Image (cartoon, rainbow, N blue to C red):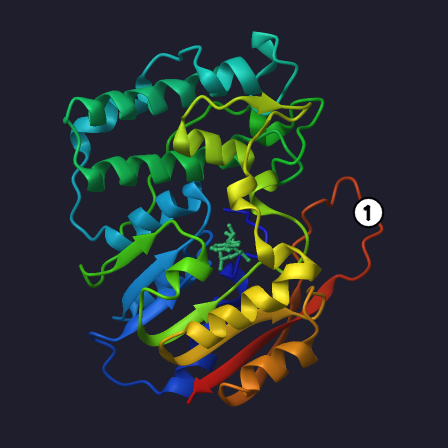
Amino acid sequence: MNYIGSKYSLIDFLKETIEVVVGIENNKGKIFADLFAGTGIVGSTFKELGYTVIANDIQHYSYVLNRHLIENTPPINIEKFNYINDLPGVEGFIYNNYCSGSGSGRNYFTDENGKKCDSIRLELEKLRLNGEILDSEYYYLLSSLLNSIDKYANTASVYGAFLKHIKQSAQKTFKLDLLPIIPGDKNCKVYNENINDLINKIEGHILYLDPPYNARQYCSNYHVLETISLYDNPELFGVTGLRESSKQKSEFCSKRTVTNAFEDVIKNANFNYIFLSYNNEGLMPIEVIEKIMSSYGRYSLFTKEYKRFRADKEENRNHKADSTIEYLHCLIKR
Ligand SMILES: C[S@@+](CC[C@H](N)C(=O)[O-])C[C@H]1O[C@@H](n2cnc3c(N)ncnc32)[C@H](O)[C@@H]1O
C-alpha cells in the first residue's frame, strides 16, 4: 500500500542496521515490537526472520492489516469464500457516502467499485455474525479488501481529498487480491492502542518506533479506509466526509506535544534495544532526540538518503526536495 511514511523502500537498511547492532543469533523466542505499525511491512519482515512480533497502531485499518500479516500463519484455506469476488454490488455505506451516483457529492470510488466494496464488507459481517467464518479467515479477507480497494481510490494518494474526474486506475473494475500469509511464530500479537498506554504493558528485546514526522494526522488522511475497516455507519462531516476521530489524533503530530509523548515511550520502554526512524524534516529536531535517548543509555545514529514519498504530487509540483535523509536512532537501554 502507498502509505505516508511507509518503510517499504527502506526495509533492507532497517534490517541490516538492526542486525549489525543486535547481532544475528537465534531469534527464536525474542520479542520484536513494531508499535507504529502502519502497513505492517517492518513487523512482517522480522516475523519472517523468526522473531515473536508484537505490532500495534492507533488506526483500526492498520490493526486489521497487521492482525492478518502478523498473527495469521499458513495454512489458511479460504476456497469456500471464493464466491465473494463475484457478489453483485450493493448500495451500502460506501456507495451512499463516497460515490457520486448516490448523490453524495463525493467521488472516492466509481459507483460500481463502491457497491462491490459494500457487498464484500457486508458479506464478511454477515458471516461473522452467523459464526460461519473463523477470525483468521475474517482478518485475512478484510485486510485483503483494505489493501486492494486502496488501489482503486480516486485520490491523488491519500483520502484527504478526492479528485473531480475519475482517474484511470480508479476506473478499473475492482478485484479482491489476497495478501500473502507470512510464516512465523504463532505467538505474535497485535494491538490497536495508543502507544503511550501500551508501552506500560509489554516488554521484549527490540523496540522499533516509526512515529509520524509531521502535522499530517493519519486519521484524517486515511478516514475512508478507517470506515471501511470499522464499517460502523459513522456520522460524516464536510466536503470530504470525515468521521469523528478525536481519540486518534496523535500527539506525535504536534510540536507542542511530541517531545513529551516521545520521552514517555523511551522512559517506560522495557526493551534492551530501541530503534527510532525519523527523518531530517520532522517536528522533533535531531538534537532533542539525541538528548532524550542518551539520557536512558548508549546512543548511536545511522543514516540513509532516500527518495521522498510525494503525497500531494499532483497539486504541489514545486515541492522542495526530491530526496531526504532517513535517520535510524539507536539506544541500548541501561
Ligand atoms: C510513519 S507511519 C508507520 C509506517 C510503518 N512503519 C510502515 O512502514 O508502514 C506512523 C503510524 O503511527 C500510527 N500512530 C500515530 N500516533 C500513534 C499513537 N499515539 N499510538 C499508536 N500508533 C500511532 C499512525 O496511525 C501510522 O500508521
Task: Tell me: is circle 1 under 8 Å from ligand 1.
Answer: no
Residue 218 spot, x, y in % from top left: 57, 46
Residue that label 1 marks: 317
Q: Residue at x 32, y 51 (%)?
A: 69
* Image position of 268 (left or right of 137): right
Residue 154 spot, x, y in % from top left: 61, 29
Residue 307 spot, x, y in % from top left: 66, 63
Q: Work out whether residue 61 or residue 175 is closer to the camera in this orientation and state it.
A: 61
* Image position of 325 (left or right of 90): right
Q: Residue at x 67, y 24 (%)?
A: 238
Q: Work out whether residue 147 or residue 240 is closer to the camera in this orientation and state it.
A: 240
Q: Residue at x 58, y 84 (%)?
A: 301
* Image position of 259 (left or right of 185): right
Residue 102, placed above or below residue 282: above
Quarter placement of the C terminus = bottom left
Q: Residue at x 61, y 13 (%)?
A: 104
